[in-house]
Image (cartoon, rainbow, N blue to C red):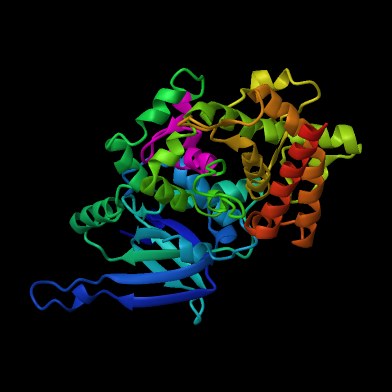
Amino acid sequence: MTKSKLNKFILKSDYSRRYPDPLNKTEEGNPYNIEHHVLLIRAIDVPSGIPKTPNPREQRIDKGIYKEVTESLKSTDELSFHLKNKGITMLAHQVEYGTPDKKVATVFFGEKDGIADGGHTYEIILATQADGSCPEEQYVKIEIITGVPQEMAVDITGGLNTAVQVDDASLMNLEGSFEWVKEALKKEPYADQISYKQNEEGKFDIREILGLMTLFNVNKYPYPQHPKDAYVSKAKCLDVYKADPDSFKMLTPLLRDILSLHDYVHLMSRKRYNDVMGGRAAAMKGVYATRKRGNYEFIFVGNEAARQLPGVKLDAMLYDGVLYPMLGAMRFLVEQKQGEKTYSWKLKSFKEVKSFFDEIAPELVSTTYNMCRTYNNKPNPVGKDNNHWDNMYKTVALAYLQRNDK
């Protein structure tokens, strides 16, 4: 096939390596001529339009684990995306280098060539490029394999895509571990927006739901411990659940409240700060993510219901790094009353819980913003700062005690 009939893409890499495949040494029949080209490329320089013909999966980057991959790529605090992500594997017809240092590679794709594995990673990179959230310092590893016979290419692609094990949450779902969650939420309008297995559609996956429940699990995280795992590692939350599911099931009566509170804190923290402090909370860098066009979706409250809250806008939301310590501090309001087997609110109703949050929200936002500024307006280290979690918790505790002393 002549090069004029091939699709051509230019890849600029900071680091590259080229080596032959061991199969090339076969002594029987015609020798293979397979080569591997490994390039370390800035994610922001990855070109669009690369074919995905060999990839057997559709890419959905808004679900479950892929949202975590997106956040990892967007992070400007931890520039280790190329170490955490296995990268992109492509099958190609030929690779030519334009410079002796191999930093500029021209890749030629035939009609059956393209991305064989890593299609989700590729789409995530393109999406962050498009919305301007792809940091210049993040890298991605790209491996290009050339000279692979077509009959072997099918097996390689299949092997790459079936090598990924079914995740733990999917296996636990198969075992029925989350039936109680499904039962508790089955009448909620967002019930079908929670995914329980790999690649299932949903705005939130079960690990995220367990993460939010972890924030209120006073059995597993009694003070002075703080449930930072809810922010730092959803996988750790899953492990905690596997080890002691009963401590999570004790939150069953509060589950819907917890999810609703998740959205309520997003929405009302901004409004209450502005009302009391007379400021512009959405302008706080590192605290609120904002949109110039369109609104964020708050499925647990519902956007229509959110619009009924006086003065509330849907064009801003807290970064997870600042949301989780704030939301986790509200676990002070959770208790196990004598003789009961489940948790309940210390206050009389969830309506009172929300009213209580309205009272303390300005102080929580102000303290959060001050902490965020010490980290150059970066929310990620705020979510990992134990002192900040402690300050949030003490703020809630003190306000509750003062309220009860009146």
* Residue drawn at the location 50% of the way across and 41% of the way down: 208
Query: From the viewer's perspective, is residue 267 above or below residue 229?
Result: above
Query: From the viewer's perspective, is residue 171 above or below residue 271?
Result: below
* Residue drawn at the location 48% of the way across and 31% of the way down: 342
* Residue drawn at the location 65% of the way across and 48% of the way down: 325
Could you tell me if residue 350 is visible in this image?
yes
Question: Nearest the camera: 133 or 311?
Answer: 311
Extreme residue in the left direction:
28
Judge from the rendering whether residue 182 lies leftward or rightward of residue 264; answer left or right: left
Judge from the rendering whether residue 54 lies leftward or rightward of residue 224; answer left or right: left
Question: Nearest the camera: 166 or 6?
Answer: 166
Magenta residues, start to end: 191-214
In x, y percent, where is residue 43? Answer: 55, 60
* On-image quarter of the C terminus: top right
In x, y percent, where is residue 352? Answer: 70, 25
In x, y percent, where is residue 402? Answer: 80, 38
Question: Nearest the camera: 12 or 272?
Answer: 272
Could you tell me if residue 49 is visible in this image?
no
Extreme residue in the bottom direction:
100
Judge from the rendering whether residue 356 lies leftward or rightward of residue 383; answer left or right: right
* Residue drawn at the location 79% of the way across and 40% of the way down: 282
Q: Quadrant of residue 156?
A: bottom left
* On-image quarter of the N terminus: bottom left
